[in-house]
Image (spheres, coloured by chain):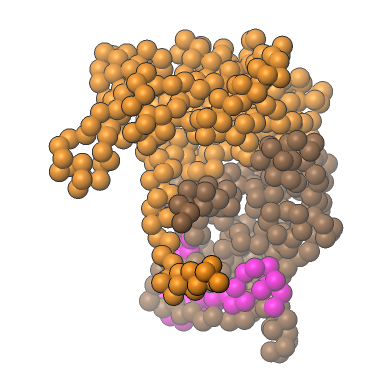
Amino acid sequence: MRSHEIDYKIIGDDMQLVEVELDPGESVIAEAGSMCYMEEGIQFETKMGDGSNPNESTFGKLFSAGKRMLSGESLFLTHFTNRGNKKYTVSFASETPGKIIPVNLPDFGGRLLCASDSFLCAALGTRISIAFTQKFGAGFFGGAGFILQKLEGDGKVFITSGGSYVKINLNNEVLRIDTGCIVAFTEGLDYSIERAGNLKSMFFGGEGLFLATIRGTGTVYLQSLPFNRLADKVIAMIPPKSSTSFDSSDSSSSD
Amino acid sequence: MRSHEIDYNIIGDDLQLVEIELDPGETVIAEAGAMLYIEDGIQFESKMGDGTEAGGFFGKLVSAGKRALTGESIFLTHFTNRGSGKKKVAFASDVPGKIVPIDLNNFGGRILCQSDSFLCAAMGTKINMAFTQKLGAGFFGGTGFILQKLEGDGKAFVNCGGCIIKKELNYETLRVDTGCIVAFTEGIDYSIERAGNLKSMFFGGEGLFLATLRGTGTVYLQSLPFSRLANKIIARVPTS
């Protein structure tokens, strides 16, 4: 199906929000929990799947929802529809500090692969499915998880980056990337995971054991502050449980 | 009392701090723990209450107790310029976001804000709690059912998580994820309503309830409520 043509406005500098303007009857689909505010005419409904195939059977829906769950995302997407009689807006933001990248899918041949937690919202009609990377090893060792999300359609999609983002056009070139820094890339690029440096840098360098290698011709979006880096830094600050409390819980369980 | 007239300078793009310039004798009151640096002549003292109460110790205790109910510290810190020239003191939020300077005169001397968004204000600003009209409203709202009311004729600074969105409502309705509310003017009716159908409530992740803001006035909203960021981090904490 053809995607709804949505207008939008991105607000903020480094921590952004997108306000999507819907004409009557238009819909936008979004990751659960990312809505900030909406005007009166907007109604929402949680649905299994992206609604891109209205004739899909329940089983088909279940199947595609299950695939979404594999990528670590919620089974459900929220559909926001303008049921009013004039234009109304609804807004979305990421749960992490960063920018929003508006992508017009036709600019990339109608298809984009993105890291599983970078999808924010898209015009109704966009198909969201999982894509395995070519080599199984690739994702298994990559911090980004070995499953990517594939966005397909002829409308606009919005993806989020942590921190600022960099857009790099590769022309038969190779780029090696910390796996967490990948936001999205176009089809035609080959993605694999390779061992990084020598043994010393693997163990002492802190750059992770493996780096993602992207090869070929196309566009790559990268982020400066992968959420995992920020979260792990916060989690490292959590004081360890004291040995005394550990002992007491131990004894109570043996009772 | 009339509020002290303070000058200020906001520094930063999206993760901001506010530098406040005090004339000799001027005071700014701030949330405990928000201060970053102070120049030479500035002295500070933790006090119960905002310093506007004329009453005795008991009056202070009552208003401090009310502040404790909103989940904030009972104490506010008073920063006073005891020097002879202009001196500066700076404050920032402990979450990434912007600072919104509010001239209370522009809003009829009164604004309601979410309990953890107050940062600092000119001495003379009254900080109170305000119950939302309907008790149910706050009880189910993620932001807690108590708001802070800032009253006065000076400047107050509130912080938001992420970017700030200012909306002017004119007999309009806006439905908002409760965590995204920073502040709104009186005259706007705040209530909590059940969101969508049962399926969205349980599977949608949009929360069980949405705040509904109705009426005429100004609303400040934030893009990155701290609770969203914190919950996302907590979800990554290894369980053991």
Residue A212 rendering spot, x and y as whole percentages? 30, 29
Residue at (73, 53) in percent of width and height: B141
The residue at 55%/72% (across/down) is A255
Considering depth in this image, is B131 or A74 the residue closer to the camera? A74
- Asked if residue B81 lies in the magenta stretch, the reply is yes
A12 over A213 or under it: above or below:
below
Q: Is residue A185 left or right of residue B97?
A: left
Of the pair A131 and A112, the residue shown nearer to us: A131
Residue B148 left/right relative to B192: left
> Chain B hue?
brown
Residue A56 position, x and y percent, is: 69, 14
Q: Is residue A216 left or right of residue A221?
A: left
Q: Quadrant of residue A246?
A: bottom left
Query: Which portion, as a residue range, is magenta?
Result: B65-92
Chain coloured orange? A
Q: Position of residue A134 (x, y in %)?
A: 37, 18
Question: Is residue B188 something that shows in the picture?
Answer: no
